[in-house]
């Protein structure tokens, strides 16, 4: 009788202590990603070991975010911060870091991963002058639209994960190998699929797409924003209209977080289809599905 | 291959551990060899991968710039160790229906900062902001304000970067973090002037020479605790002789609701025990208050943006309420009176960005006071009695923001601060040159 009671009690104790033990050994590494593409990449490279939070969604302009209270709370608890860098987050990340008071993710710490420091950027400004618009001195920061650069960042990011979480080194190494294998074959697949897009003439709203244009060999004929980050003026739009009339364009690419007024206007005037593209990974999507979607959307609308 | 090397290294390490006979120099040598081997393997793998990427790119196109090298931009290298410097220019054209010297706020003691601008053209308060990380532990920032021909040190402080989890210390001269608007520089405000309650209680803004500690509680929602100790020399305290002359405490909590909504709620308290001859301009002559003062406040901010993207459309609602109790003496010329003051006030405002380059806003201010003392005629001369008048003001604003760095604003005030209603117009420009300034919440 007593034995039975003891064993029941033991069962209870074991059951009760199970979640505790689980929490203790499996306390995940908190990752704060500035943009959803880095959240998605981190998930690929760390799997279940990471609790990944993305500060922005694909529907938000990562340049125009405020250091919201919720972001401060998340940054305060982060073990690793992954951001684009190249001044994309210059308007909010420095304030966020100062307010959060988390030494682990301060600039210069192993827990501060700035992707731009691991790749070569296009459009590096040789002259810094605000009359040119919102110029990024370090180069165009939208390099996550080039899978080769993503691949390169994956190698560096995996190294960072191994450095700050050495107990799981083999896990990260394994995840990296899996990811690179799958990503390489996906790149080959995307490139084959996107063959018909080569040489297509495109108009873009903002120079978000320069890396994608290069990768898929699209031919950009005009940009709706005369100057980066500054809403297009009517004089500039009429110039773009003239250019599109003269050269004709195959489609207009509009980033879905930006106002589509100018793109719709040009589309009506020139009878050119508008493609609304997500410049990053949507909720519930992984990085493969996002590239699949980009390429498919482009193919569907291509005349 | 790496795994193989690691396995080999591990086996060697195991062997070394179990063989105490080996001299430590030999162990070092082996360790060195293993490290070299590991490095060699890593380099080879990297070289292979690099080669692969290069080959893939070469096959793909010749126009792609190799992404392999790290950023190495000369424009960036030049100012690697320079501090961040920005200069904010502010100027305005003011039109008032009453004379600006007539301005007073019945029931409230104003300092000389809190008046109205002169009518006509004026350069407002331009600011030079210099900031930088000092080293890996400290950050420093200085803000010098130029108004007209005068220069003043608005803020000059340092703060810690990695003191402890969530704990930050700040010291020097800084705007107090009590209230929502107080810590923001005037050029960030959504209106050309401070809310009436800020004008009445703080002389527009509460500044501290002292120390601040803030702690972010580790939780899923934002939960901040803060304490400030100051020398008690700046308005609404004055000339405290030594030690801590005033202190304040605040709690802020905040979070998101879904992806489109966010909010922050703050509670705050300020007090000074030994205010010594705080001078204010009265109706008849200048007067001084000595005694103790306590302020309690609550602030609330709510923001909405479609998809949480404030670039195109954005709504911000803001409300703050403060109350103050003061006990002490009033001196006006040679007369003295006991003073028992109670003042309170609030403002509510809504700002709507309806196009990427256009914002509009409405604000309503309301104040109340119930001051008492041993010599009512003296209080009346000091302007501390209201005779039933409730100061109120309605403001409307429209602004054009062609870029993040420029703003042209038109503001209209229907100002009933005192008995004669004043209709005010401000046409204001604000330009920021130099480094990019941040967007705090």
Image (cartoon, rainbow, N blue to C red):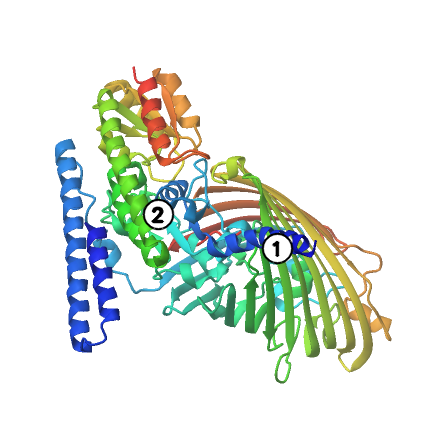
Q: Is residue A187 left or right of residue A166?
A: left
Q: Which residue is mark 1?
A: A10
Q: How far is mark 1 from mark 2, CA to CA?
A: 51 Å
Residue A287 shows in the view: yes
Q: Which residue is mark 2?
A: A84
Query: Of callouts 1 and 2, which one flags the residue occurring earlier in the amino acid sequence?
Result: 1
Residue at (62% x, 49% y) in the render:
B301
Residue sitting at the far bottom: B242
Q: Quick check: do tags 1 and 2 share a chain?
A: yes
Q: Residue B230: horizontal and vertical position, in percent?
A: 59, 75
Question: Badge 1 sits on which subunit?
Answer: A
Q: Secondary structure at mark 2?
A: loop
Q: Residue B211: horizontal and vertical position, in percent?
A: 55, 73
Q: Residue B276: horizontal and vertical position, in percent?
A: 69, 80
Q: Is residue B373 above or below residue A248?
A: below
- Mark 2 nearby-residue class (10 Å; few <14, some 14–19, many ≥20): many
Q: B167 or A48: which is nearer to us?
A: A48
Q: Quadrant of residue B56?
A: top left
Q: A218 or B345: which is nearer to us?
A: A218
Disc number for residue A79: none
Q: B158 or B219: which is nearer to us?
A: B219
Residue at (31% x, 51% y) in the render:
A170
Q: Quadrant of residue A297?
A: top left
Q: Is residue A242 left or right of residue A67?
A: left
Residue B115 shows in the view: no
Q: B229 or B93: which is nearer to us?
A: B229
Q: Is residue A179 above or below residue A71?
A: above
């Amino acid at each position: 009788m007593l034995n039975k009671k003891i064993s029941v009690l033991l069962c209870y104790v074991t059951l009760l202590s199970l979640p505790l033990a689980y929490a203790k050994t499996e306390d995940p590494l908190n990752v704060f990603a500035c943009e959803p593409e880095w959240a998605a990449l981190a998930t690929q490279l760390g799997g279940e070991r990471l609790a990944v939070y993305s500060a922005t969604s694909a529907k938000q302009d990562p340049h125009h975010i405020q250091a919201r209270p919720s972001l401060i709370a998340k940054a305060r608890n982060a073990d690793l911060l992954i951001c684009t860098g190249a001044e994309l987050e210059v308007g909010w990340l420095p304030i966020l870091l100062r307010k959060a008071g988390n030494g682990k993710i301060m600039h210069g710490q192993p827990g501060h991963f700035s992707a731009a420091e691991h790749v070569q950027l296009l459009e590096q400004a040789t002259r810094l002058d605000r009359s040119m618009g919102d110029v990024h001195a370090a180069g165009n920061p939208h390099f996550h639209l080039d899978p080769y650069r993503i691949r390169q960042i994956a190698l560096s990011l995996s190294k960072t994960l191994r450095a700050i979480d050495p107990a799981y080194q083999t896990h990260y190494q394994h995840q990296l190998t899996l990811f690179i294998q799958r990503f390489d074959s996906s790149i080959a697949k995307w490139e084959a699929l996107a063959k018909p897009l080569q040489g297509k003439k495109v108009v873009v709203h903002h120079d978000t797409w320069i890396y994608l244009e290069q990768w898929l060999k699209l031919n950009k004929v005009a940009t709706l924003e005369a100057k980066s980050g500054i809403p297009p003026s009517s004089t500039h739009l009429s110039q773009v209209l003239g250019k599109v009339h003269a050269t004709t364009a195959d489609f207009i690419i509009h980033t879905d977080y930006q106002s589509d007024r100018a793109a719709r206007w040009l589309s009506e005037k020139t009878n050119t289809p508008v493609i609304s593209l997500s410049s990053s990974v949507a909720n519930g999507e992984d990085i493969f599905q996002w590239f699949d979607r980009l390429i498919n959307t482009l193919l569907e609308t291509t005349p | 291959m790496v795994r193989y090397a690691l396995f080999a290294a591990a086996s060697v390490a195991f062997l070394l551990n179990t063989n105490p006979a080996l001299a430590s120099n030999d162990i070092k040598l082996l360790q060195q060899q293993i490290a070299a081997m590991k490095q060699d393997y890593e380099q080879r793998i990297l070289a292979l991968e690099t080669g692969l990427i290069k080959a893939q790119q070469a096959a793909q196109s010749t126009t792609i710039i190799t992404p392999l090298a790290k950023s190495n931009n000369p424009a960036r290298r030049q100012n690697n160790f320079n501090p961040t410097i920005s200069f904010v220019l502010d100027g305005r054209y003011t039109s008032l229906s009453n004379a600006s010297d007539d301005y007073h706020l019945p029931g409230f003691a104003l300092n000389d900062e809190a008046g109205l601008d002169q009518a006509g053209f004026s350069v407002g308060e331009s600011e030079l902001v210099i900031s930088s990380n000092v080293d890996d532990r400290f950050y420093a920032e200085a803000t010098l304000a130029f108004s007209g021909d005068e220069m003043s040190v608005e803020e000059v402080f340092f703060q810690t970067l990695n003191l402890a989890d969530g704990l930050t210390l700040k010291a020097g001269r800084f705007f107090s973090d009590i209230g929502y608007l107080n810590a923001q520089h005037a050029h960030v405000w959504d209106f050309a002037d401070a809310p009436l309650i800020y004008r009445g209680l703080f002389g527009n803004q509460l500044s501290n020479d002292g120390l601040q500690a803030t702690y972010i509680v580790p939780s899923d929602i934002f939960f901040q605790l803060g304490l400030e100790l100051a020398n008690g020399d700046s308005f609404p305290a004055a000339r405290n002789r030594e030690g801590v002359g005033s202190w304040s405490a605040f709690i802020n909590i905040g979070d998101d609701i879904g992806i489109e909504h966010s909010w922050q709620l703050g509670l705050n308290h300020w007090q000074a025990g030994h205010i010594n001859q705080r001078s204010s301009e009265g109706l008849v002559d200048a007067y001084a208050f000595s005694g103790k003062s306590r302020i309690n406040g609550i602030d609330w901010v709510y923001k909405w943006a479609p998809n949480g993207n404030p670039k195109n459309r954005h709504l911000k609602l803001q409300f703050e309420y403060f109350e103050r109790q003061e006990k002490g003496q009033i001196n006006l010329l040679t007369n003295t009176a006991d003073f028992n003051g109670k003042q309170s006030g609030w403002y509510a405002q809504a700002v709507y960005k309806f196009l990427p380059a256009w914002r509009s806003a409405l604000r309503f201010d309301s104040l109340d006071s119930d001051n008492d003392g041993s010599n009512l005629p003296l209080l009346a001369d000091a302007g501390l009695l209201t005779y039933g008048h409730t100061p109120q003001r309605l403001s409307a604003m429209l602004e054009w923001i062609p870029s993040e760095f420029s703003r042209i604003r038109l503001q209209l005030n229907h100002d009933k601060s005192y008995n004669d209603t004043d209709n005010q117009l401000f046409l204001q420009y604000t330009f920021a040159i130099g480094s990019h300034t941040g967007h705090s919440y």
